Image (tube, helix red, strand yellow):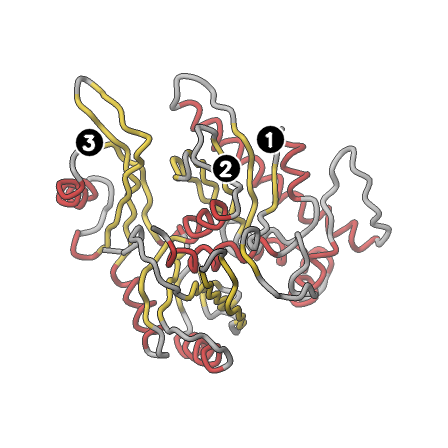
Amino acid sequence: MLKLFQKTRKPEIGLEISPEGICAVLLEKNKNCTLKCYAYEPFPAYTIENGLIVNYEAFTDTLKKHMDNTKFDTKIVNIAVPSNVAFIKTITLPDLPLNELKVIVPQEALKHIPFPLNEINIDFEVIENSKKTEDSVKKVDIILVALAKSIAKNYIDLISSTGFIVNSIDITPFASIRTLANAGYIDNSDSLFISTLIDYEHTDINILHKGMPVFSNSIPLGKKNIIDLLSGNLEIDNVSAEKLLPEIALVVPGINIDQPDPQLNRAAAAIRPIFSNITSEIQKTIEFYNSKNSENKIFERIIVSGSGACIQNIDKYFTNKLKIETLLCNSFKNIDHDLETNEHFIYPVNLPALSTSLGLALKGFES
């Protein structure tokens, strides 16, 4: 099993592993949730591509350096893999006791996954609010997640070789959703929310109902595409393009932007198609979800997170285009911390990038 949906009650390091680097968070929970330790270590280029570790030596060297330079008092970690390397599907099954579902789900998975059962790890979660009766039979929706054992073993073996102990493997957008819930951006009401995680290589769009993802969509657009477009259009290297990101603002009708620098104007125009495409995918996701229901649903808000939420006015741009209130995720909302605001923590531009690592750390406190 993936141990994706298991629940624990102890501090564990939220270890986010992305093509950009390693971000680790350790929380402490007394009366409030407090940031105990935070660290970031960048990867050399081409260490991870499309969610798979391709340079083992660079990966382990970076993780060892990370461990040596931090003061974590535990080596137990929760990690996540991107949604594009996992199989995620919502299926409907008879509403049976959990022990019976554990027997049925792996067999049901074979109808949807083109791989032998002995080559995959499977986990699932019942969407409690989806219970219904069809043709006099009680049924329930479940989220089915499958991950190739080879991918899981690859991550676990390499991480274990550096002294860390992998407690669980999550899926990146699901970890981020946990942060949204802790921050109060979503709730258990009947309202619908949209989590939009713009990560380095992909954007994950999840429709949420009562805190659970009921429909998912993933597209290959992320921070990498933004940087590549900037470097190509402005004829600058990727490092310079990335440094420019916090200064760029998307143009939104009715909002006056003081951006006299011609380079910044060119930069905003260059990357606008990416956010236009993401907007279109959110709209398509909404329309497809509504097509499966008897009536169109009202969406409360969109919450944007991930390292690709790295320029100004993304929230205003989505609000203007989709006519749905959009917020950038302040990942530290409802978490006490003493981090100083500096060039690496400019709210609200890149605090959304911490949503996954914090979500993985919060996993240790689920009850």
- Left or right, 99 with respect to 213, comes to left
Q: Residues within 10 Å of mark 3 (few under 14, many from 20)?
A: some
Residue 26 image point, x, y percent: 46, 66
CB of mark 1 within 8 Å of CB of mark 2?
Answer: yes
Q: Which mark is residue 194?
A: 2
Q: Which residue in the structure is indicated by mark 1?
A: 324
Q: Nearer the viewer, mark 3 or mark 1?
A: 3
Q: Is residue 137 left or right of residue 222?
A: left
Mark 1 secondary-structure assignment: loop
Q: Left or right: 151 with respect to 54?
A: left
Q: Earlier in the sequence, mark 3 or mark 1?
A: 3
Category of crowding for the residue at label 1, using alpha-carbon neighbours closer than 10 angstroms: few (below 14), some (14–19), many (at least 20): some
Q: CA distance from mark 3 to mark 1?
A: 34 Å
In percent of width and height, residue 170 lies at: 36, 55
Q: Residue 182: x, y in percent? A: 48, 48
Q: Which quadrant of the figure contains the N terminus?
A: bottom left
